Amino acid sequence: MSRLRERERTHDLPKLIGEVQLVAPTEGEVRAWVERWMRRPDGPAIRSVTWEFARWKPGVSTTCSYDVCFEDGEPEVVVAKTYADGKDKILTQRPLKAKSWSEVSPSLIPRAKVPDRPTLLFVNAADRELKGTPVFLLRKKLASFLHKAGLAPPGMVRRRRLEARLVRYKPERRAVYRVHVRLRDAGKTRFDLGCRIHPLAEASRIVAAREAFEAAGGKDVPRLSGHIERYGILFEPWLDVETFDPDTFEHAEDAGTVLARLHATPSPPALSATARAALSATDFEGLRPLLRVDAALEARLFPLEIAPCERVTWCHNDFHPDQVARRRDGTWMLLDLDELGPGDPVADLANWIADRAVDERLGDFDELSRALLAGYARGRGAPVDRARLLALTARGLVHRGAAAVRRLQKDALDVAAFALDTARSFVP
């Protein structure tokens, strides 16, 4: 299903700055709405509704996703997006483009407007930013995509046995599926693929970066198996690897080693020059509306100056514990390469350290960084400027504090206070 990191959430944070209209709906409300306006007349009864994801943009919208499980065991994801500007009424009038919504969303009508509230409900296949999803979920089209991407001979995919299971979904950002394929050949070949669906422009950027990285000799990452540019669909092999939870840091030393090898990959000069200009941005003003939920939090914001980045390499740019995996032969690799591109290698290290500081409520920088930096040195990573690493970790902590509020975490105020106080202690 759409597994994201489990968090306790609260509905009421928007009330703290007077945005009552953007309070997130409860699971009970969503269940009643889905039952009344989305469940197909002949569809199975709803067994449970579980809140999975939240993203609050003050003054703009609140986006939440819910796993809806049915008595027949087949789940679907429903997104409830509440708007501050009446956009829900405009979007309701726009037609949905799919040839067979009953195949794409068998239990629910794909979209509905909640009366008397500025809230739009839609299944994940009707996500207006992920235009490839409703096409991808049609077995006939998926079989055709596998042929076009060079992953299966024409006419050889057993359509009735073709399965696509959602494994992760962030509304309007990406959907990740595991696709099980069976062929009609004499050996009855079976294999699994990972499929990532992105907004079209984002998918094009990712493909260009992945191809440039491979051309530069990049290693320790899964290679793209193929892509369908028109729909923002990317295929990768489904890997038999050991993965880690996002709050597990026991593999820090090995993670540092594989990261050092990534940073050793030469970055094209043209891409490096473009990236360098944006790598020292420290503007926290965009976070201020989130921190206004508590005057004491907003008061903790502080100016942070970071010297221009002097060294640009290929970077992961979203480096976290669950992005590192161990192969069955004991070697290591990096996963989730949506942000792969030229960047500041110190920022990758800072990402990991800031994660650990927040997850473990630990403010000892040397303890937070010791194993990671030891592994980085073992992998022959370039010497790391301590002052820069401290400053970038501080920047990451400020963003994580604001993110706890954006995600409507139940303990968001405590997380944000710790993150901002720790960030301030890391810089002069």
Image: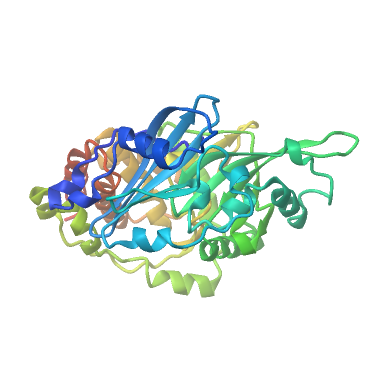
Q: Name the colouring of the figure.
A: rainbow
Quarter of the image where one finds residue 193: top right
The structure residue drawn at horizontal position 30% and vertical position 45%, both measured from the top left corner, is: 407
Give x and y (percent) for residue 1: 51, 34
| Total numbered labels placed on residues in the image | 0
In the image, residue 219 above or below residue 201: above
Residue in front for this viewpoint, 177 or 338: 177
**Which residue occupies the foreground of this view, 408 or 402?**
408
Residue 43 or residue 409, whichever sits in front: 43
Quadrant in the picture for the C terminus? bottom left
- In the image, taking residue 68 as reference, residue 56 lies left or right, namely left
Considering only vertical position in the picture, is 258 above or below 73? below
* Residue 119 in the image: above or below residue 357: below
Q: Residue at x 46, y 54 (%)?
A: 173
> In the displayed structure, does residue 162 sit left or right of residue 103?
right
Q: What residue lies at 63% left-to-right and 49% top-to-bottom? A: 100
Residue 390 in percent (x, y) is at: 27, 52
Q: Residue furthest front?
A: 41
Tell me if 20 is positioned left or right of 5 in this view: left
Residue 336 visible in this rendered orientation of the protein: no
Q: Residue furthest right?
A: 186
